[in-house]
Image (cartoon, rainbow, N blue to C red):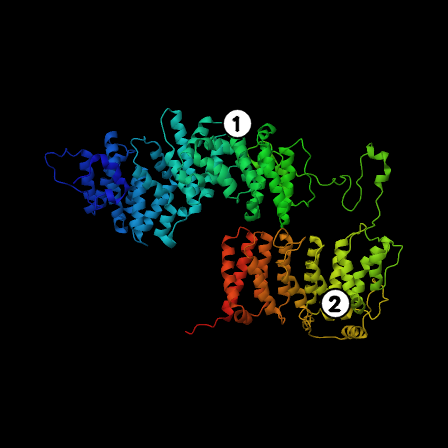
Amino acid sequence: MRPSPRLGPMWRLGPMWMPTAPCAFTSFPLNRMDPVPSSVRLTVREAVHTLSSSEDGGCIFSTLGSLKRYLGGTENPALPGEQEEFARVHFSAVLRCLVSKLNPDWLGLLPNGQLEELWASFFLEGPADQAFLVLMEALEDTPGPSFRLMKMARLLARFLKAGRMAAVMEGQCRQQAELAFPLLQEALLIKVVGLPDRLGNCLQHENLAEFFPQNYFPLLGEEAVRVLQAVVDSLRGGLDCSVSFVSQVVGKACVYGRQKEILGVLVPRLTALTQGSCLWQRVCWRLVECVPDRAMEAVLTGLVETAPGPQVLARLLGNLVLKSKKARFVMTQKLLFLQYRYTTPVLQSLLGYLAMDSQRRPLLVQALKELMETWGSSSAIRHAPLAQQCYVSKAVLICLAHLGDAELQDSRDELLASLMAGVKCRLDSSLPAVRRLGMVVAEVASARIHPEGPPLKFQYEEDELSCEMLALATPQPAADSPSEAGPPVAPVAAEAPDKQTVEGGVPQVRPQGSDSELDSDDEFVPYDMSGDQELKSGKVPMYVRDCVEALTTSEDWERWEAALRALEGLVVRSPAATREVSVELAQVLLHLEEKTSVAGFEGLRQRALVAVTITDPARVAEYLTSQFYAINYSLRQRMDILDVLALAAQELSRPGRFRRTSQCGSPGPTCPPSCTVAPTWRAVVDERIRRKTRRFSKGSSRQGPAGSPNEFNSVAGYFFFPLIQGFDRPLVTFDLLGDDQLVLGRLAHTLGALMYLAVNTTVAVSMGKALLEFVWALRFHGDTYVRRGLLSAVSSVLLSVPAERLLEDLPDELLEARSWLADVAEKDPDEDCRMLAVKALLLLEKLKDKLLPLSPP
């Protein structure tokens, strides 16, 4: 049965609406009820028959010429009605017939490529949507590689270069809503956006550069701009048009992950076109409004990332967030709370867009409330990664910079409560970056939310992030691009140097008549006093006991400072004398407080305590570990104990330390600290021989490191086991499993370091088993710093314990650790934790590959 004429356009969709024979025009016997065939139908039927059967080049050429009359553009074109009927009913069948005849012999029936050019003109000059669909259908149905496949691919490349894709989209934009065919539009949409993938599958290694995604989607963006220009021209001429199909194309391309390619072309062009045209702005608003909901997020994120500023974003979007619930959710929820990968300029564009219009400003106020609620949530602080916390903090400061006091007045109490809760939780964090983040936001936000109250002030080290956040608190001038606004001005931390001087301290010659003539002393060059040392009236102690006495009983502050500075050198040079008072000296140093403003007091105290621990490791380590869990110690002192133990263990385990110590030591204690040890006679003789000897070939003069015992081997247990035994026993002023999670994190890192330094020691297996039990008990701890220490400890066990002993003594622990590490690597919110877990898993894999026997062939 014949297809109905009113279904004619659906023939363009594909083979399901087409006759089965591609070359023969199907004819049916006419009965008395059939209408009389039109002249166009008879002509097309005869032409198709001629093309299918004739081998005469001239006959084929004249037949194609007669058919081309129906496309217009010839000397004797057909009537408009006949052209419309040909395009609507018969054009697809003619194209399919032409595709089926494509072969080298057929094209060679006429010389100089005349037949090929006439054949290609039907695809390049006829209705673009039908030609595109037939070309895509032929490419997908033709097996390759073949002559026909490559010829059709090159023809499609010509089709794209000729701008015919714009004609495809423009034809759909000019159709009235009641005359549009949804199935046709869906087929066009799928093939237009999926062209690179489909052509890549068809052509494989023979694919053309025009079909690469990085080349095709920018071209598609250019064609979309041409279509929008045609729509604007039609609207100015009083004709109705629709941009729905272009919206669907842009949306689907963005869903495919090609926002950068297509919007990178669209946004700059639309930015210039909407600069002073209300009509273009309305067309852009309609373009985004017609994007399907399933593609709205991809389009909006791409626009926010590509738009150079909030002004451009406002021109492109209008009040879209007020009209579309999906757009409002994306702009005020998804981009602020659920994603944090965007840069600071993107965040400024997004929130600046909400602040630019009075109708959108209530959304900005509501966003600030929700941001402050999230910022003050203790759960969010514990479970959100640091990058997301920085992202939310920046959003809070940008919102505060855009809102006025009157807008903040109604929500002041709510915002202040969230701010105080967030500050408390962040100051309790064990991560310095989180604490610094809370201080910066608290200073800025408190001054804006509660300006009449006392300002909050904190002492923190300024870094790049804090300077950036302080700059965000100042609203930027309105500009279309970041380059117009200028760089943010960071607060001045110190007075600028004198501009009248140059490097090296040499003053420049000042012009005559200036005010500098009144003060001629400024022209003198100051002396270089960088190498001068302050003269001390007191004597430097010469014995360790003198240092102990000076540090405990002396009221002479100069003698006290001299004793502290000389103590490390005396301990190194007098190990025997140090062992007599090692525990007493460690106790004095542990409780030592800074009584004067001594430069580098903490470093001097720590180095002296480390030197004492190295000199008498067993007794001093036993004392320090016992004091770690004692009462009446501050958290700072407990962390100092951990640092000293780790540094001492590192020095004890260093190869060649014993030999270097014996060379640097002095037989008597009377040598002043600044003296240098004289070279031995052997060194002098070797140096003379080297100078007097002539060698014709000289090998490497470097000697390998001399073997020496690991001094940490015999004392590792004194450092490790007392620390790990009492972590679960809370004291009145010290609770590692409670509020003192900062010390717990430092303890985990220290235990991991001790385990790593105990490699090849006799107690490594026992230490590894105890450390894995410690890790297993705390594996679900909520603090990020603690989890990092636990993961580092697992890696230390895998590196220090011999592989054979691991599988023999700790098989169950390794299986449990593997499943836990895999879960951390996949789900932990902290990036560093995930990275540490991946490294530990890699160590486990290397361990398995090393020990498991190779399977027999």
Q: Residue furthest front?
A: 732
- Please state which of residues 650 and 192 is positioned toward the viewer in this rendering: 650
Residue drawn at (88%, 58%), measured in percent from left and top?
539
The kind of residue tagged 2 is: Asp
Categorize mark 2 by other alpha carbons within 10 Å: few (<14), some (14-19), many (20+). Answer: some
- Please state which of residues 779 and 164 is positioned toward the viewer in this rendering: 779
Q: Quadrant of residue 563?
A: bottom right
Residue that badge 1 annotates: 358
Where is residue 310? Give x, y as percent: 53, 34
Where is residue 99? Give x, y as percent: 27, 46
**Disc 1, SS:** loop
Residue drawn at (54%, 48%), measured in percent from left and top?
383
- Please state which of residues 491 and 330 is positioned toward the viewer in this rendering: 330
Quadrant showing the C terminus: bottom left
The kind of residue tagged 1 is: Ser
Residue drawn at (74%, 75%), measured in percent from left and top?
694
Residue that badge 2 annotates: 616
Above or below, 775 relative to 6? below
Quadrant showing the N terminus: top left
Where is residue 133? Give x, y as percent: 31, 42
Asked whether the viewer can see residue 79, the reply is: no
Above or below, 300 relative to 778? above
**Disc 2, SS:** loop
Categorize mark 1 by other alpha carbons within 10 Å: few (<14), some (14-19), many (20+). Answer: few
Residue drawn at (59%, 63%), measured in percent from left and top?
771
Q: Quadrant of residue 43?
A: top left
Disc 2/disc 1 C-alpha distance (Å): 73 Å
Which of pointers 2 and 1 indicates the residue nearer the eye?
A: 2
Asked whether the viewer can see residue 87, the reply is: yes
Where is residue 443? Give x, y as percent: 65, 38
Quick one: label 2 or label 1, which is nearer the N terminus?
1
